[in-house]
Amino acid sequence: MIIIYILVQKLDDKTKREWELHVSNKELPTLQQLYTFLEHRCNALESVSTKPKTNEQKQFSDRKMSHSYVSVKLTCEVCKGSHTVSQCNTFKQLSNDERYKIVKDNKLH
Ligand SMILES: [Zn+2]
Protein backbone atom coordinates (compact mmCIF):
# COMPACT_ATOMS: atom_id res chain seq x y z
CA MET A 1 0.00 0.00 0.00
CA ILE A 2 3.06 2.21 0.03
CA ILE A 3 2.71 2.61 -3.71
CA ILE A 4 -0.73 4.10 -3.25
CA TYR A 5 0.60 6.47 -0.65
CA ILE A 6 3.38 7.63 -2.96
CA LEU A 7 1.04 8.03 -5.89
CA VAL A 8 -1.45 10.01 -3.85
CA GLN A 9 1.32 12.30 -2.65
CA LYS A 10 2.06 13.15 -6.27
CA LEU A 11 -1.49 14.20 -6.93
CA ASP A 12 -2.48 17.82 -6.84
CA ASP A 13 -4.24 19.00 -3.70
CA LYS A 14 -7.70 18.97 -5.16
CA THR A 15 -7.37 15.47 -6.55
CA LYS A 16 -5.78 14.29 -3.33
CA ARG A 17 -8.70 15.65 -1.32
CA GLU A 18 -11.19 13.99 -3.61
CA TRP A 19 -9.29 10.76 -3.29
CA GLU A 20 -9.37 11.01 0.49
CA LEU A 21 -13.09 11.64 0.36
CA HIS A 22 -13.42 8.79 -2.07
CA VAL A 23 -11.73 6.31 0.23
CA SER A 24 -12.85 7.74 3.54
CA ASN A 25 -14.67 5.47 5.94
CA LYS A 26 -13.66 2.54 3.86
CA GLU A 27 -11.12 -0.15 4.12
CA LEU A 28 -7.59 0.49 2.98
CA PRO A 29 -7.77 1.46 -0.67
CA THR A 30 -6.41 -0.91 -3.21
CA LEU A 31 -4.25 0.06 -6.10
CA GLN A 32 -7.06 -0.82 -8.43
CA GLN A 33 -9.32 1.62 -6.64
CA LEU A 34 -6.75 4.35 -7.10
CA TYR A 35 -6.37 3.57 -10.76
CA THR A 36 -10.11 3.63 -11.26
CA PHE A 37 -10.37 6.87 -9.36
CA LEU A 38 -7.57 8.47 -11.36
CA GLU A 39 -9.05 7.23 -14.59
CA HIS A 40 -12.35 8.88 -13.81
CA ARG A 41 -10.51 11.92 -12.60
CA CYS A 42 -8.54 12.18 -15.81
CA ASN A 43 -11.62 11.74 -17.91
CA ALA A 44 -13.33 14.50 -15.98
CA LEU A 45 -10.38 16.81 -16.42
CA GLU A 46 -10.13 16.03 -20.10
CA SER A 47 -13.80 16.69 -20.69
CA VAL A 48 -13.40 20.06 -19.00
CA SER A 49 -10.20 21.11 -20.68
CA THR A 50 -11.10 19.90 -24.12
CA LYS A 51 -11.92 22.81 -26.30
CA PRO A 52 -13.57 22.58 -29.65
CA LYS A 53 -10.89 22.72 -32.23
CA THR A 54 -11.19 25.58 -34.57
CA ASN A 55 -10.52 24.80 -38.13
CA GLU A 56 -8.15 27.49 -39.09
CA GLN A 57 -8.19 27.50 -42.78
CA LYS A 58 -5.67 29.86 -44.09
CA GLN A 59 -7.34 31.61 -46.87
CA PHE A 60 -5.12 33.33 -49.28
CA SER A 61 -7.02 36.25 -50.60
CA ASP A 62 -6.19 36.65 -54.21
CA ARG A 63 -5.70 40.31 -53.99
CA LYS A 64 -5.64 41.87 -57.37
CA MET A 65 -2.48 43.74 -58.09
CA SER A 66 -3.90 45.61 -61.04
CA HIS A 67 -4.71 48.70 -59.01
CA SER A 68 -1.33 48.93 -57.41
CA TYR A 69 1.31 50.90 -59.15
CA VAL A 70 4.95 51.42 -58.57
CA SER A 71 5.64 54.97 -57.61
CA VAL A 72 8.71 56.13 -59.39
CA LYS A 73 10.93 57.83 -56.93
CA LEU A 74 13.74 59.95 -58.23
CA THR A 75 16.97 59.05 -56.58
CA CYS A 76 20.21 60.54 -57.60
CA GLU A 77 22.89 57.90 -57.88
CA VAL A 78 25.56 60.45 -57.08
CA CYS A 79 24.29 62.11 -53.91
CA LYS A 80 21.10 60.08 -53.30
CA GLY A 81 19.03 63.22 -53.59
CA SER A 82 15.57 63.32 -55.10
CA HIS A 83 16.58 64.36 -58.56
CA THR A 84 18.06 62.84 -61.64
CA VAL A 85 21.75 62.63 -62.17
CA SER A 86 21.55 65.13 -65.00
CA GLN A 87 20.04 67.64 -62.56
CA CYS A 88 22.59 66.93 -59.87
CA ASN A 89 24.83 69.79 -58.92
CA THR A 90 27.28 67.43 -57.32
CA PHE A 91 27.47 65.50 -60.53
CA LYS A 92 28.05 68.66 -62.52
CA GLN A 93 30.98 69.60 -60.38
CA LEU A 94 32.71 66.33 -60.95
CA SER A 95 35.43 65.86 -63.45
CA ASN A 96 34.74 63.99 -66.63
CA ASP A 97 36.58 60.96 -65.36
CA GLU A 98 34.54 60.87 -62.15
CA ARG A 99 31.31 61.35 -64.08
CA TYR A 100 32.26 58.58 -66.41
CA LYS A 101 33.02 56.33 -63.48
CA ILE A 102 29.66 56.98 -61.83
CA VAL A 103 27.80 56.54 -65.07
CA LYS A 104 29.66 53.34 -65.70
CA ASP A 105 29.16 51.99 -62.17
CA ASN A 106 25.45 52.76 -62.15
CA LYS A 107 24.94 51.91 -65.79
CA LEU A 108 23.47 55.32 -66.44
CA HIS A 109 23.92 55.32 -70.14
ZN1 LIG B 1 22.47 64.33 -56.81
Image (spheres, grey):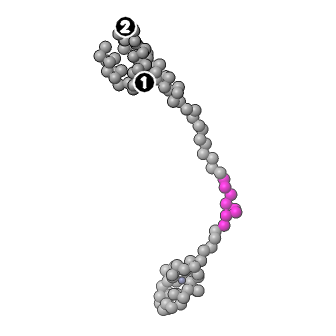
Front residue of 95/54: it is 54
Using residue 91 as the reference point, say whether residue 21 is left or right of it: left
Q: On the picture, is 69 further left or further right than 45?
A: right
Residue drawn at x 65%, y 51% is: 61
Are the two marked residues, 2 and 1, in contact with CB atoms closer than 8 angstroms?
no
Residue placed farthest to the right in the image? 67
Image location of residue 84, percent across then percent down: 58, 82
Q: Secondary structure at mark 1?
A: helix
Residue 35 is at least partly visible in this image? no
User: Who comes first in sequence, dot 2 or dot 1?
Assistant: 1
Task: Name the quarter showing ligand 1.
Answer: bottom right
- Mark 1: few, some, or many residues within 10 Å (few <14, many ≥20)? few
> For this view, does 28 lie left or right of residue 55?
left
Note whether ligand 1 is within 8 Å of mark 2: no
> Residue under circle 1?
14
Number of numbered callouts drawn: 2
* Residue appearing at x 59%, y 41% in the figure: 56
Magenta span: predominant SS is loop
Q: Tell me which residue sits at (37%, 11%) in the image.
A: 29
**Residue drawn at point x = 67 percent, y = 64 percent:** 68
**Range of magenta residues:** 62-69
- Specify the amino acid type for callout 1: Lys
109 part of magenta stretch: no
Along the viewing direction, whichever of 27 and 52 lies nearer the viewer = 27
Kindly report the distance in space between the C-alpha atoms of the residues bearing marks 2 and 1.
22 Å
The residue lying toward the viewer, choosing from 29 and 82, is 29
Quadrant hosting residue 1: top left
Residue 57 falls left or right of residue 103: right
Queried whether the magenta region covers residue 68, the answer comes back as yes
Mark 2 nearby-residue class (10 Å; few <14, some 14–19, many ≥20): few
Q: Is residue 55 above or below residue 14?
A: below
